[in-house]
Image (tube, rainbow, N blue to C red):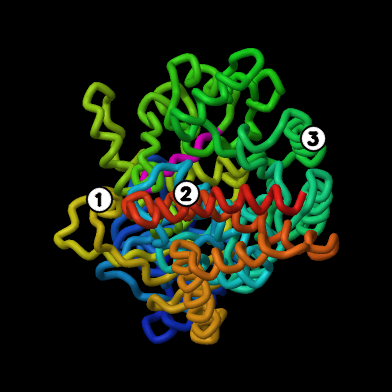
Amino acid sequence: MMNIHLRNLSGAEFSINAQPSDTKQEESSTMAQRVDTIIHARWIVPVEPRDVYHEHHSLVIRDGVIVDILPTKDISSKYVADKEHDLSKHHALMPGLVNLHSHSPMTLLRGLCDGVELNEWLIHFMWPHEGKWMSPEFVRTGSRIAVSEMIKSGVTCFNDMYFFPDVTAEVVDQVGMRGTVGAIIIQFPSAWASSSQEYIDKGLALIQKYEKHSRIRVVLAPHATYTVGDEDLLRMKEISERYDTKVHIHLHETSFEVSEHKKNDQLGRSPIKRLVDLGMMNERLIAVHMTQLTDEDINIVASSGASVAHCPESNLKLGSGICPTSKLIRAGVNVGLGTDGAASNDDLDMLGEMRTSALVDKYKVEDPALPGAEILRFGTMNGAKALGLDHLIGSLEVGKRADVIAVKLAARPVYNPIISLVYVGTNRVEYSWVDGRCILDEGKLTIVDESTWEKEIDEWGEKIISWDRERKSPDLKQINTQIQTYLSSQLKEEEKKDVRSQLEQWRSQLGSWKYFSQKDEEMTRQLDTLSTDLTRLEKHIE
């Protein structure tokens, strides 16, 4: 028997007695700790500490928590696992990505338009479809598409804002992700709520329902300063303070938004300054987009402790501008990364979003560019911090929850995995764990069978595109015949009620018909005639 002196990971010395060779294997197995999962990786990128990576290391998980990160050569003497993954050739382990801003159900509205700015996109495309289709079923199917896409692109946690957030929360729970759903409020009725009070009541019920859930949280989600008034914003502030929950809002997204707000505000304030006066610019605020910022705005955000959700691909597609991330970081602002909804992106790929963020940051050469390691934090640690979850997730550290992804690095040789993760667009996420539970295995979801969703997805797609074509190409001959019939009739009072309803519907559609017929002179002429006939009909039923 031989006495051997060793050092543990903290540097302290200890000794063991070596056994004869025939009992060595048995003794090693007896001493090793039983754990749930061991993942052997070519590289581990922990994010914290910053700009560090480990080669040929393994990550150990027990009870949903990271219990060790150590050289792979040392693993067998310390741990025995129920499940081991050998990803030691081409995979990098990193924290699961945190998508700080999304509208999950809008996957069903992906690809309906192109080449339009935000106002056109909302008025002529999104709001008409949402008015037509909004329902729990729409949200469920759209959310299912979204979570599948996000998991496969490395997202383990996302921060959502949409109607029927209760349905999105159910989908998140079903697939095993971590999610923060927004209790939305907007100053017009929807299928979700008919009044400000109903939006608030339903939001409070949702906060209380998920108060103790381990993976799902609820934040407050006033849509924007141009769609929510002071009274409701102050209610959001009060609820946020009472429940210590975050407030997730679109802010300074476009130059039009900022200029119109200043024009319509009695004090000529910008949206940011209005929120300052309302007491809402604080560490609980997640300000989304922030493409139009003065140096004064940046100082206000920095001193308030608010976080910013940067959505470069959506902002580029809608021509909104680009968030000045370098200036914000230098000012000490916490900047996370979001995809926005798939209807304005048109995907939910956070690895792609990191790459775009890194590249557009280098476009303005007068600002020192951010290194890849900082961009990686945008999609991980900074997003977790914005959500108040950085003590649990956002980095691979002992004691944190095991939200981990394994990315197969496609372009070899790899000299620095951090650079590869940020800049190489062909990397593939093959494995994902949330709370130590594998939710993606070799690129396939493990907890749900996606094939059972295919029929409903196809059915929704057919309904949506069919109605979209109809609304752009009205049957003017049929409408004109109907109007002439009404004009030539002596209508009774009960009949006038139905005609008024039909008249309101035609009037609401007329703007969109004219918008989609701008390049068709004959159609434009016919629509002008229709407008005149609708005015005649309105007088006829007075």
**Is 225 situated left or right of 367 in this image?**
right
Name the residue that disc number 1 marks.
423
Is residue 153 found inside the magenta-colored segment of the image?
Answer: no
Relative to 172, 355 lies left or right:
left
Whether residue 201 is situated above or below residue 209 in the rendered picture: above
Q: Residues within 10 Å of mark 3 (few under 14, many from 20)?
A: few
Residue at image location 40% in from the left, 47% down from the top: 314
Q: Position of residue 207 (x, y in %)?
A: 77, 52
Residue 32 seen in this snapshot:
no
Report if residue 312 lies within the magenta region.
yes
**Is label 1 in a helix, a strand or a loop?**
helix
| Residue depicted at 56% across the width and 41% down the height | 385
Q: Nearer the viewer, residue 499 or 465?
A: 499
Please determine whether, in this image, residue 502 is positioned above or below residue 89.
above
State if disc 2 and disc 3 touch (CB < 8 Å): no
- Label 3 or label 1, whichever lies nearer to me, is 3
In front of the other: 372 or 391: 372
Q: How many marks?
A: 3
The residue indicated by pointer 2 is 528
Q: CA distance from mark 2 to mark 1?
A: 52 Å
SS at badge 3: helix
Which residue appears farthest toward the left when viewing the image? 413
Q: Which label number is shown at residue 235?
A: 3
Question: Which residues are drawn in magenta?
Answer: 307-313
Q: Of helix, strand and loop, which one carries label 2?
A: helix
Circle 2 or circle 1, nearest the eye: 2
Q: For the residue marked with disc 3, what is the amino acid?
A: Arg
Q: Quadrant of the N terminus?
A: bottom left
